[in-house]
Image (spheres, rainbow, N blue to C red):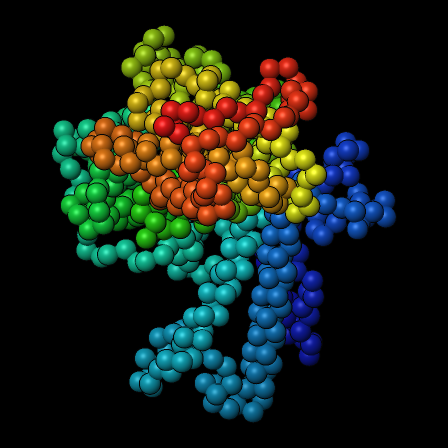
């Protein structure tokens, strides 16, 4: 956001605009008062214009208060940064003005704008001053990054130097350990890359299809073409990242051959990051999602939470959290792609928040996007004959995952994110939520592959344990809930052990989030055993609580029954 500084040569004073103008590209959601009154909300912080005019500024609240506070913090940080820059420019202008009268040594009045100036003059470089200057520049960039979350649709950003870009900013903010240098992997022959690509499509792409499979095959053809000009940077990025993810999924430990090959493919992909990681484009979000999938398998080098947060902000700023109006002219293929990308971002954001016990990047109430793959015709490109894509992946597993994340988002928000006041009787809601998870499992597609079905079973058991564990709404759990947690944890451990002992090529990849889920269920298992060891190990299950079906959720609802097979 430019801050105009007007220097009048005929005047003795510098006229500086005292108030920098910051504009939010679009509100994530209307405030509660504007939403109930069905009036347009401009999303201004800390209170929108409609609430200010009505004298209700103190009551103005966004749908997602935490997101609004995040905007407010980035707004204040940006203002402070602008004030410091203006004060620095004012001091330099006054120094130059004095130097024109007294003619002192220029180097004593104003610092050099080029770091190489001292080297050219032969003077020693002050390392401490250089480090302070570098730290100050980083702080400026961090404040600008907070501004990107507010207005990421712009193609250019004020305050960036020629050596800084959105891609470098994202990679710097989301990196942990530096990547090893000199490990760029040569593009393997196509016959060697084909099984790796197919493994990715059968596992990761089957549940997170945020790009068209036919478009990806076109990228593969372009990369392996004899004419290098046919392949765009996005083609190289997609192929290299898919090879990196598929190769890393076959790795058994850090540092083995598969791991080194995956890092080599990643380094080759990062050579195109400047041309690929751009805000304001769907392709930039797709490129970030590929990096998120890699980070789930390599948490040592990248922070998946920061990456999915950047993808979520870019997605919201593009307005993809809302379906276009029916009057808008958008093709079915473009609408389908928008929905794919949104739901994949949604699924990864919800999974990240549950595992790391963080707030969501955006609320469910602020979004309104239809489930993709509602009809088979939307997946066929214009001009292709019907049935030409029968060999492509089925998306039943992806739709099942989207519905699962919706259920998890609802009960996680209710039990853990909406307040700290305990409910007088939380179990009617808990049993109803428990049944909703069971109903989701019963309705899952029978065509799901074995590896993805095992992943869904682990997700179901993990959700059971999560729902029944102590929460702000239910800080003290019943003995029957303890028994359910005890048995579900045993079932989870048995399935996870079986999954980790299978051959790598015959299963879905085990990610960093799977390790976090296993750790969480293990902690809950130890906790319930420490609380009620004698009853749990006696072999006599406690009597189910007498909760009426009407209180639980109507006819057909009942308290979950203990798994006797797991107990045995």
- Residue 438's place in the image compared with 227, above or below, is above
Task: Name the one closer to the observer, 326 or 549.
Answer: 549
Residue at 42% across / 32% down in the picture? 539
Find residue 322 and report its image quarter.
Answer: top right
Q: Point out the residue furthest to the top here.
A: 386
Q: Position of residue 555 (x, y in %)?
A: 64, 15
- Residue 8's place in the image compared with 315, above or below, is below
Residue at 49% across / 61% down in the picture? 141
Number of on-image labels: 0
Task: Name the one closer to the observer, 410 or 281.
Answer: 410
Residue at 69% across / 70% down in the picture? 15
Q: Position of residue 264 (x, y in %)?
A: 21, 47
The N terminus, quarter of image: bottom right
Q: Point out the residue furthest to the right here.
A: 55
- Residue 29's place in the image compared with 530, above or below, is above
Find residue 415 and report its image quarter.
Answer: top right
In the displayed structure image, the side of residue 127 where residue 480 appears, left or right: right
In the displayed structure image, the side of residue 5 where residue 435 appears, left or right: left
Q: Is residue 8 visible?
A: yes
Residue at 75% across / 49% down in the picture? 47
Q: Position of residue 94 (x, y in %)?
A: 60, 81
- Residue 35's place in the image compared with 384, above or below, is below
Q: Is residue 468 visible?
A: no
In the displayed structure image, the side of residue 228 where residue 299 appears, left or right: right
The C terminus, quarter of image: top left
């Amino acid at each position: 956001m430019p801050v105009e500084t007007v220097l009048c040569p005929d005047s003795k004073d510098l006229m500086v605009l005292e108030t920098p103008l910051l504009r939010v590209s679009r509100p994530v959601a209307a405030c509660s008062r504007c939403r109930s009154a069905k009036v347009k909300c401009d999303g201004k912080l800390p209170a929108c214009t409609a609430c200010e005019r009505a004298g209700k500024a103190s009551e103005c609240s966004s749908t997602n208060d935490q997101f609004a506070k995040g905007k407010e913090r980035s707004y204040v940080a940006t203002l402070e940064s602008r004030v410091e820059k203006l004060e620095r420019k004012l001091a330099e202008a006054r120094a130059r003005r004095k130097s024109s009268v007294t003619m002192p040594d220029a180097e004593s009045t104003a610092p050099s704008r080029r770091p190489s100036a001292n080297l050219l003059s032969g003077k020693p470089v002050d390392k401490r001053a250089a480090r302070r200057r570098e730290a100050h520049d980083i702080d400026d960039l961090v404040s600008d990054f907070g501004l990107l979350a507010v207005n990421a649709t712009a193609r250019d950003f004020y305050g960036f130097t020629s050596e800084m870009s959105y891609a470098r900013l994202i990679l710097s903010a989301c990196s942990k350990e530096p990547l090893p240098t000199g490990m760029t992997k040569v593009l393997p022959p196509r016959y060697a890359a084909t099984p790796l690509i197919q493994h990715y499509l059968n596992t990761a792409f089957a549940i997170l299809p945020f790009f068209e499979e036919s478009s990806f095959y076109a990228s593969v053809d372009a990369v392996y073409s004899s004419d290098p000009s046919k392949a765009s940077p996005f083609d190289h990025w997609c192929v290299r990242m898919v090879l990196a993810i598929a190769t890393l999924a076959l790795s058994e430990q850090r540092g083995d051959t598969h791991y080194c090959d995956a890092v080599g493919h990643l380094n080759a992909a990062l050579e195109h990051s400047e041309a690929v990681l751009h805000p304001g484009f769907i392709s930039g979000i797709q490129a970030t999602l590929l990096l998120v999938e890699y980070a789930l398998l390599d948490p040592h080098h990248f922070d998946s939470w920061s990456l999915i947060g950047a993808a979520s902000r870019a997605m919201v700023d593009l307005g993809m959290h809302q379906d276009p109006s029916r009057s808008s002219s958008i093709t079915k293929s473009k609408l389908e792609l928008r929905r794919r990308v949104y739901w994949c971002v949604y699924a990864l954001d919800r999974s990240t928040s549950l595992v790391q016990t963080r707030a969501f990047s955006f609320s469910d109430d602020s979004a309104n996007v239809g489930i993709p793959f509602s009809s088979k015709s939307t997946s066929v490109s214009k001009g292709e004959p019907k049935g030409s894509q029968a060999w492509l992946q089925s998306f039943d597993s992806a739709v099942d995952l989207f519905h699962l994340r919706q259920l998890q988002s609802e009960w996680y928000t209710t039990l853990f994110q909406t307040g700290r006041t305990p409910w007088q009787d939380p179990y009617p809601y808990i049993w109803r939520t428990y049944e909703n998870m069971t109903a989701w499992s019963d309705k899952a597609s029978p065509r799901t592959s074995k590896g993805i079905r095992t992943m869904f079973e682990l997700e179901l058991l993990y959700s059971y344990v999560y729902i029944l564990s102590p929460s702000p709404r239910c800080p003290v759990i019943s003995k029957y809930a303890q028994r359910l947690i005890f048995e579900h944890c045993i079932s989870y451990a048995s399935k996870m052990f079986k999954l980790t002992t299978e051959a790598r090529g015959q299963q879905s990849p085990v990610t960093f989030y799977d390790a976090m889920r296993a750790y969480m269920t293990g902690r809950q298992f130890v906790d319930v055993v420490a609380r009620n060891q004698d009853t749990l190990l006696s072999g006599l299950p406690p009597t189910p609580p007498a909760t009426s079906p009407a209180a639980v959720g109507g006819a057909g609802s009942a308290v979950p029954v203990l798994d006797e097979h797991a107990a045995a």
